[in-house]
Image (tube, rainbow, N blue to C red):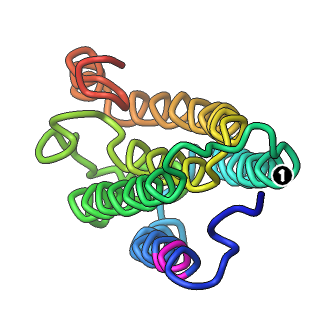
Amino acid sequence: MQPLMLQSGIYQTLFIAAVILFAVQQIPALQSTLRLTGRGGSPTRDKGSYMVVQVAVLAGVVLGYQAATHLKVATITWHRPLVFFLGVGLIVLGSAISWLAIRQLGRYFTVVVAVRPDQPVIRSGLYGIVRHPSYTGQLLVFLGYSVTLTNWVSIPAVMIVTIAGYLYRIMVEEQGLRAQLGAPYAEYMARSHRLIPGVW
């Protein structure tokens, strides 16, 4: 059974629009990174975590898609269009959360781990709810993608690999921020959750 996103009409249009929305809201983060890490900018503490995330995401996306196209027995048939629309909604919600997190962090947000000497610990807005709201939003996007595939195997295939990449990124980022920002960030870590409010 072909994934709905490959079918012409509203399914394909909605999926493409949601993906474009996610891609466009990442542009300010890329611009901020170029300004921060360019000549004379702050050194990075990335330890390859940006590339790890990119590889993990690509692997998850491909594995999920392959599962949806080859494991037809695992296709979600219960209200399949509704499940697809739920997935698109998660992509839009995740994109909005990620965009807002990038906006709230402003010039301090980068796609590689790099800390300005004058960087404060941001505790307001979404950062008052979780430490890494942009990653929460991005993981919702990939959860949404996995749900749009309407296949039971696709969901863990996408999410397990993708989450593993983000966990490594979070570990590297928190090490860098703790080393650069010191006690204020350590205190912030002690009283906040990483990705899921009230859980973890």
- Confirm whether residue 48 shows in the render: no
x, y percent for residue 188: 22, 25
> What residue do we see at 19% from left, 45% from top?
126
Q: Is residue 103 above or below residue 77?
A: below
Q: Nearer the viewer, residue 94 or 54?
A: 94
Q: Residue 88 lies in what quarter of the image?
A: bottom left
Q: Which residue is mark 1?
A: 66
Check if residue 79 falls in the magenta segment.
no
Was residue 14 drawn as part of the magenta stretch in this picture?
A: yes
| 97 on left or right of 177 | left
Question: Which residue is found at the position 48% from the left and 67% from the top?
Answer: 33
Magenta residues?
A: 13-17
Residue 198 in the image: state x and y as whole percent: 23, 19
Is 41 above or below relative to 84? below
Depth order, front residue of 107/133 = 133
Q: Quadrant of the N terminus?
A: bottom right
The residue lying toward the viewer, choosing from 54 and 3, is 3
